[in-house]
Image (cartoon, coloured by chain):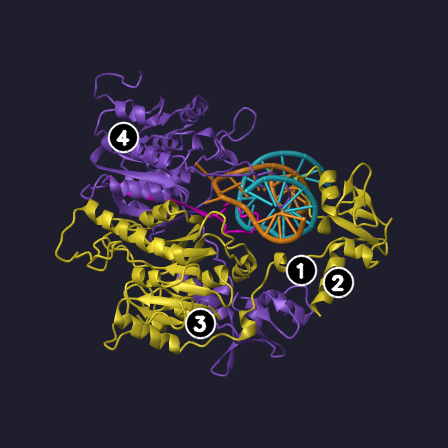
Chain colours: A purple, B yellow, C orange, D cyan
Amino acid sequence: MNVMTKGADALPLNQILAGDCIDVMNSLPAGSVDLIFADPPYNLQLKGELHRPDNSRVDAVDDHWDQFDSFRVYDQFTHAWLKAARRLLKPNGAIWVIGSYHNIFRVGAELQNQGYWILNDVVWRKSNPMPNFRGKRFTNAHETMIWAGKDENAKYTFNYEALKALNEGIQMRSDWVLPICTGHERLKDDAGDKAHPTQKPESLLHRILVGSTNPGDVILDPFFGTGTTGAVAKMLGRDFIGIEREETYRKVAAKRIGKVRKFDRDALQTTTSKRAEPRVPFGQLVERGMLRPGEELYSLNGRHKAKVRADGTLIGADVKGSIHQVGAAYEGAPSCNGWTYWCFKKDGKRVPIDLLRQQIRAEMAN
Amino acid sequence: MNVMTKGADALPLNQILAGDCIDVMNSLPAGSVDLIFADPPYNLQLKGELHRPDNSRVDAVDDHWDQFDSFRVYDQFTHAWLKAARRLLKPNGAIWVIGSYHNIFRVGAELQNQGYWILNDVVWRKSNPMPNFRGKRFTNAHETMIWAGKDENAKYTFNYEALKALNEGIQMRSDWVLPICTGHERLKDDAGDKAHPTQKPESLLHRILVGSTNPGDVILDPFFGTGTTGAVAKMLGRDFIGIEREETYRKVAAKRIGKVRKFDRDALQTTTSKRAEPRVPFGQLVERGMLRPGEELYSLNGRHKAKVRADGTLIGADVKGSIHQVGAAYEGAPSCNGWTYWCFKKDGKRVPIDLLRQQIRAEMAN
DNA sequence: CGGCCTAGTGAATCACCAT
DNA sequence: AATGGTGATTCACTAGGCC
């Protein structure tokens, strides 16, 4: 095995180790790693094929490494790798694990059972998720990450001020809005297809490593894939250890990381986000009780009225639909801004519903 | 016990039942409930509120468990109430459970172990959470809800179009931005303090009940608290069954629900899906003379044509069959909606045959 | 070079009824 | 229980071609 470089305590830093992650982790020295980031198989259990409404086929994650015979087998796998991982952590080390509803509950329970201490669950809200094509469920628009210390007393690293700076001076929350990995960042194979089905965005790892490691820390990723963890660790001046079974992924990752340049120190604070006015669905006014189902709205000119329904649509004399549709129909216009067209009665006076939208936006800004 | 009102199958609708939720659930008839919403206790310290599956009381106040025992007892409690809940569900019933990282992973794993089929995990993203004052972790700004069917094959209720309407015409996602319960909605006791420590906002229940129940459905809440589920169910014209151990909460909830008014009937009508529309066989268009045998139909893109036959099938250059089969064959697609694919000629212009189906449906409605 | 249009795609547990 | 026919269903974003 080529894992060790010198003595028994030498760490193979900034390398991608080949093999099963449990075997490799067991061969590394205990208590040697500051942070673990793990993106284990999700055990998706997909059945048939799925097509988009335009009949194109969805390229599913049906790789052999995601197949498990049962929850029992998956639990045994989870138990084994989390145990090996915990042995490697320094006393004040911590772990991040990412997953979906298929596997994350089992992972979280096992973390607790082994004595890891959960610090937060963090939700990655995808700004551009794949829709639910058949209209049978909610758009699966997020993934869940669990951040846990090695045990209840671990003095984990948390760079509060750096995260606050990343978030325009506001305390970082447990929900992070980030786009999925697309475009030039998404690695391709020689045929031009995606090199890995589940490549994570660098922005995600950037936030994790800035927030929970310091320069010079050692970060282990036992499911290295195409090496997002290694690439971001290198940029940020951290050391990494990657473990990956598949040779193709290792090759892609090595090439990628070779091209990465470490950031200048002061180049780090450039990830600012411009914030557009958040979209507020009219239905939220109903859900929040600002308008009641059955309540009447009046057009700005006073000539028309319509009744609010429980799902946030309006029903008038002979039309029903969104605030915009009903307004347009009444005016015989091709379109209509329902927010400024419709008013509710307050103390006998007509007040545009846009006022209620502004209240919600003010809340969201906090 | 005052649970039953008439025979063994009578349900105590729109009542708040006193007692331990496991006992009470076991006394209710199996297969009688459409939806369960559950907000179980989160804390693992238990504080004497729990019973073992054999109904022996867990005396937590004087004990100091180590962590493992604490998780074990919580798991037993979770196992027991989820099992009792599953017995009550109709074959096509579903459940929602809300929790935080302290308990949700154990709840989710137990749901899967019992054969519930997870449909989504939904994140309630709080627009005004309590900050993390000590700056040692991320602001805990969300809670997690799990939506699951009774089993893998349950035909759960999902009002896709109503939810889409609530979200301004865009498919509803798995992350919901809603404020926590404050202001007038937050119930106070006689001393002016909050009546319940974890009162859920009505907006949350509004979205859940609009999305996954129909008017007249029976909704059970085994941890009723101050009755948000019952209040919203009543507004929306659903029936509820509440179970609550604490008399103070039952009193507050009863008073609250008594004041709630049901929304108007037409306000409860929500946008429905096309699947609910009556099926019209294509052959009817021929029988009724809206299309004549021998008449030619043209594909929407203009590239293909086919001839109508007397039995309501189409014949093309080298295929024959239903409107859907011939369309799919021409497009080399796995499936095709012939109603929107095929057009007939009217005044020289191509018009989709779906227009004729709509005429028939309009007649049927009268 | 910019604007406009078309094509492609992403960790997905994605029908239902009649026979 | 298994089969086969009908027919319902998508959002945000990127890349690249054309003008």
Chain letter of disc 1 in the image: B
In front: C5, or A80? A80
Residue at figure coordinates x 29%, y 57% from the top left: B131
Residue B142 shows in the view:
no
Q: Say if residue B43 shows up in the picture.
A: yes
Disc ID at residue A34: none
Picture layout, residue B172 above or below residue A90: below
Q: Which residue is mark 4?
A: A84
Circle 2: residue type: Gln
Query: From the image, which quarter does the N terminus of chain A lie in?
Result: top left
Residue at disc 1, secondary structure: loop
Q: CA distance from mark 1 to mark 2?
A: 12 Å
The residue that mark 1 highlights is B278
- The subunit letter for the residue under badge 2 reads B
Residue corresponding to mark 3: B234
- In this picture, is B118 found above or below A224? below
Q: Nearer the viewer, mark 1 or mark 4?
A: 1
Tell me the magenta residue range: A126-149
* Circle 3/circle 4 CB separation < 8 Å: no
Q: Chain of mark 3?
A: B
In the image, are marks 1 and 3 on the same chain?
Answer: yes
Going by the numbered disc 4, the residue's amino acid type is Ala
Give percent across and percent down for residue B49: 23, 60
Tag shown at residue B359: 2
Q: Is residue A129 left or right of residue C4?
A: left
Q: Residues within 10 Å of mark 4 (few under 14, many from 20)?
A: some
Question: Which mark is in front, 2 or 4?
Answer: 2
Q: Main secondary structure of the magenta part?
A: loop
Q: Answer whether labels 2 and 4 touch (C-beta < 8 Å).
A: no
The chain that hosts pointer 4 is A
Rendered view: C2 above or below A15: below
Q: Does residue A195 appear left or right of residue A34 in this picture?
A: right
